[in-house]
Amino acid sequence: MSNQIIEKLLNGAEVEWKPLGEVAELKRGQVITAKDTTEGNIPVISGGQKPAYYTGNYNREGETITVAGSGAYAGFLMYWNEPIFLGDAFSVKPDLEVLITKYVYHFLLSRQQRIFNLKKGSGVPHVYPKDLSSLLIPIPPLSIQEKIVKTLDKFTELEATLEAELALRKKQYQYYRETLLTFPQDLDKEGYNDIIKALCHSGKVVFRALGEVGEVRMCKRILKEQTTSEGDIPFYKIGTFGKEANSYISRELFEEYKQKYSYPKKGDILISAAGTIGRTVVFDGEDSYFQDSNIVWIENDESQVLNKFLFYIYQIANWNIAEGGTIQRLYNDNLKKLKIPVPSISEQQKIVKILDKFDRLTNSISEGLPKEIALRCKQYEYYREQLLDFPKL
């Protein structure tokens, strides 16, 4: 199928394909460590997805495309238009008589996965300049490159604006979450912040230990031989908590254990008691099972404390973490002793309503800013593929 966008854009102009190494300089950076840096705000670009640290010197300036040289992100592309210090990476500087730097960057982004696939080495993977130099790049007239860059930059600029807005909203969310859940323990309402004063008219906010609010529960222990790599019911361990399950149990075992032993109800707040302590997942009620002792929940009376209120309390909780072997562990006693503020149910509902709005705006992939960013990203990728789909002669 012909690409009508490209045909209209070219309007009869020819496109030449050449190896990148013939029309651009691919040059390695310099070895640098944190102790070698001097005070300054020049980003040091190495093997990651963001600056490794900052220094006072630079070895690249102006428009520069960087390619991470080694590590898990070897081959990762970035564009800079400021002085940088290039470390464990290499730069791509095109011949400006035939190529626009931003055009080359957009083209290379369209080949990002292919560049990742250039990784070599059984230990620490590397991507080398010589491997990328053979990549063929289409070279339309500069005027057409300018049009392509102008179009694609509009999408990336909009995405950057949305990312900045998301970062601002997350800070706002954090501020209101901490403000709305901070109560003085002396029960003196005059000590409350202005927002809490406005919400809590009665001033009857008591502090209770979680052990007074409800009982710590967990699922029945599942043995390794009871799990399979495929099956009916997903079994979440601490490593897959909040992610995609990689173990399963049978429907029969699930139904038996669900009836005989503790099992969360829809809306209960599951808590990680090992690994990254205090991570939370709101149980959606779908058939699934959870690793005992590592994933727990509080079985509480929602006429006293709302589950969703607990969810937000857990986000700011200062867990009293004890050491358990080689990993941190949150024991039942730690959970039971955690003191939380308990305002009236009506006031809990007000707090939850406000925080839910921020949570949807900043975290929901079905609405809010994350959804908008994802849509703009897909839009950019679509037009990038269309605008760079030049015919090979």
Image: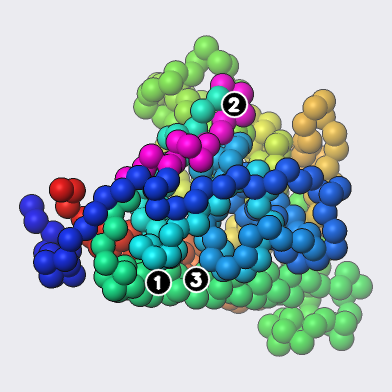
Residue plotted at (49% across, 71% down): 160
Residue type highlighted by circle 1: Asp
Q: CA distance from mark 2 to mark 1?
A: 54 Å
Q: Are marks 1 and 3 in contact (CB under 8 Å)?
A: no
The total number of labels drawn is: 3
**Mark 1 Cα shell of 10 Å, populated few (<14), some (14-19), many (≥20):** some
* Quadrant in which residue 344 is drawn: bottom right
Q: Magenta-highlighted stretch: main secondary structure?
A: loop
Q: Which residues are magenta?
A: 122-136
Residue plotted at (18% across, 70% down): 9
Q: CA distance from mark 1 to mark 3?
A: 10 Å
Indicate whether 264 appears above or below 379: above
* Residue located beneath label 2 in the image: 220
**Mark 2 Cα shell of 10 Å, populated few (<14), some (14-19), many (≥20):** some
Q: Position of residue 38 (x, y in %)?
A: 85, 58
Indicate whether 12 appears above or below 15: below
Answer with left or right where residue 270 lies relative to residue 381. Answer: right
Q: Position of residue 192 (x, y in %)?
A: 82, 81
Indicate whether 149 appears above or below 188: above
Give SS at disc 2.
loop
Rendered image: mark on residue 160: 3
Q: Is residue 134 magenta?
A: yes
Res. 345 in view = no
* Residue located beneath label 1 in the image: 153
